[in-house]
Image: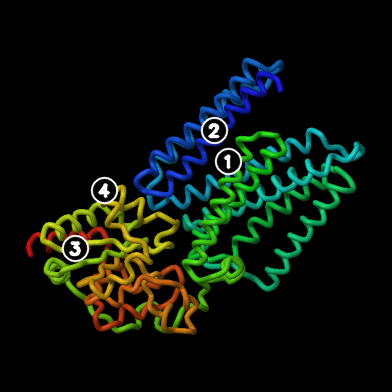
């Protein structure tokens, strides 16, 4: 190895170790920011070394340096400004679009490598090179268009309902079969450029066809799965380019995305096959009572505040309603007031609360809610019978007791937060509209449940005023 290759190897090694340690630190809210900075520093070191080697050390580097000189600041500017300006409620959309960008970049690099060396009449390229290149191209292309559709569904640009049609699974199967056949032909018969372009085009269509039939309720799982796809595509690209940093980073993203997808499926008691092909959340899943036919009892903010202020223990269950209303600061103030009055306050976090894993934890951490008051589902479910009040803020499907009792419910078997076991349940909700799953929630008709309708932030602020006066 030359000196340049040795130095490059160690730079990539430092970057890889930074990625691994950064991922480790991300496992805890206490160390997450440190992990994020460490991984970003590792990436900056690797990118900086690539720029140096291309600009200063390699002959002919000046011919491509302008691409790096423009691309690096533009990419950093777009990423930095986008991350700072995006509201927390739109974080899943940003993750989806960044996933797509990563997948698209991997597909473009794979295509560039193929087009540089391939030709209709030339010798076949090595099998290992072709397998890695085609994997990077197809997975990256699927991740690109799939992520764009996921972004559209989360943003409301594309319908959140599953979009299905007769024979849709046959079309998806045909696309997949066509990609496999073309992959074999490109690897063993000919390195035809038109066939390769057709191969990539089919992969782009497959990404759309695979995500459109999936409902908005499953988008967090889909985004996680596409994240894993992007990691695999990047790892394949690293193999093609013989780049250790890409190989390690892509493998880490692919493995962590796959594990996260499995954990989320387990939290919903569903298989990944059911998520991808179950068309969960269709209009047909809505029960007859959904949409406001239930007999419910309303409560005033003052009465709800008194109920909590004189209770022994209050468990707050945050959901997407809290995120949409940006009510986390008011919730923190409510927590402080209740603690001052001697009430024990904890937060119950369902693994799929909100629209992405950890969404509620980040929102509450943003409001400086102490980490030790955030309890995961398995950690707090046994405490609900000891709670004077369970305060549910927009969390619909993850508190639905039908998941335990109704075998005909589409969410039957899904682990839920046992809020119905608390002494009193207060639900903050805009209306009686169904949640993402599109099904009725019998919790609202439970005799111990009272409803406080309205915008979550205004309702919590009213509770704060009520607790102050209690």
Q: Which mark is residue 303?
A: none
Give the residue number, with chain letter if any, for mark 2: 15
Give the residue number, with chain letter if any, for mark 1: 249
Q: Is residue 321 visible?
A: no
Tell me the CA gap for discs 1 and 4: 31 Å
In the image, what residue occupies the spot 84% across and 39% down? Answer: 125
Q: Is residue 226 above or below residue 413?
A: above
Q: Position of residue 446 (x, y in %)?
A: 29, 82
Q: Residues within 10 Å of mark 2 (few under 14, many from 20)?
A: many
Q: Going by the image, does 413 lie left or right of 372?
A: right
Q: Position of residue 178 (x, y in %)?
A: 79, 58
Of the image marks 3 and 2, the number of the one nearer the N terminus: 2
Q: Residues within 10 Å of mark 1 (few under 14, many from 20)?
A: many
Give SS at disc 4.
loop
* Residues at circles 1 and 2 in contact by the CB criterion of under 8 Å: yes
Give the residue number, with chain letter if any, for mark 3: 344
Give the residue number, with chain letter if any, for mark 4: 368
């Amino acid at each position: 190895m030359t000196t340049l290759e040795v130095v490059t190897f160690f730079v990539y090694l430092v970057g890889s170790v930074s990625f691994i340690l950064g991922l480790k630190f991300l496992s805890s809210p206490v160390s997450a920011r440190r992990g994020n900075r460490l991984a970003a520093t590792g990436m900056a070191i690797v990118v900086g070394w690539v720029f140096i080697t291309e600009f200063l050390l390699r002959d002919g580097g000046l011919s491509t340096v302008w691409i790096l000189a423009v691309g690096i600041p533009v990419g950093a500017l777009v990423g930095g400004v986008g991350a700072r300006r995006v509201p927390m409620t739109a974080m899943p959309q940003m993750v989806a679009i960044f996933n797509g960008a990563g997948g698209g970049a991997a597909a473009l690099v794979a295509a560039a490598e193929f087009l540089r060396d391939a030709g209709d009449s030339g010798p076949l390229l090595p099998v290992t090179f072709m397998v890695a290149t085609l994997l990077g191209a197809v997975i990256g292309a699927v991740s690109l268009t799939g992520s764009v559709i996921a972004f559209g569904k989360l943003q409301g640009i594309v319908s959140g309902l599953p979009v299905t049609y007769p024979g849709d699974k046959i079309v998806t199967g045909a696309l997949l079969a066509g990609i496999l056949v073309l992959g074999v032909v490109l690897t063993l018969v000919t390195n035809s450029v038109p066939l390769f372009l057709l191969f990539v085009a089919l992969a782009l269509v497959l990404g759309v066809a695979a995500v459109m039939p999936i409902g908005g309720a499953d988008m967090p799982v889909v985004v996680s799965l596409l994240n894993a796809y992007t990691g695999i595509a990047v790892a394949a690209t690293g193999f093609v380019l013989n780049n250790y940093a890409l190989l390690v980073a892509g493998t880490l993203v692919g493995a962590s995305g796959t594990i996260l997808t499995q954990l989320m499926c387990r939290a919903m008691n569903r298989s990944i096959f059911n998520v991808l092909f179950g068309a969960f959340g269709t209009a047909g899943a809505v029960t007859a009572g959904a949409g406001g036919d239930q007999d419910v009892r309303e409560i005033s903010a003052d009465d709800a505040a008194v109920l909590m202020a004189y209770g022994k223990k209050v468990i707050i269950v945050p959901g997407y309603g809290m995120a949409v209303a940006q009510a986390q600061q008011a919730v923190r103030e409510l927590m402080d007031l209740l603690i001052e009055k001697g009430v024990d306050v904890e937060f119950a976090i369902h693994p799929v609360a909100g629209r992405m894993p950890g969404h509620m934890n980040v929102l509450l951490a943003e409001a400086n809610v102490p980490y030790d008051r955030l309890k995961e589902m398995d950690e707090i479910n046994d405490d609900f019978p000891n709670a004077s009040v369970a305060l549910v803020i927009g969390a619909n499907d993850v508190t639905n007791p039908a998941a335990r009792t109704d075998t005909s419910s589409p969410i039957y078997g899904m682990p839920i937060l046992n809020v119905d076991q608390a002494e009193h349940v207060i639900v903050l909700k805009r209306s009686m509209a169904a949640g993402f799953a599109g099904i009725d929630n019998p919790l609202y008709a439970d005799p111990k449940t009272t409803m406080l309708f309205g915008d979550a932030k205004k309702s919590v602020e009213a509770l704060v005023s009520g607790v102050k006066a209690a």
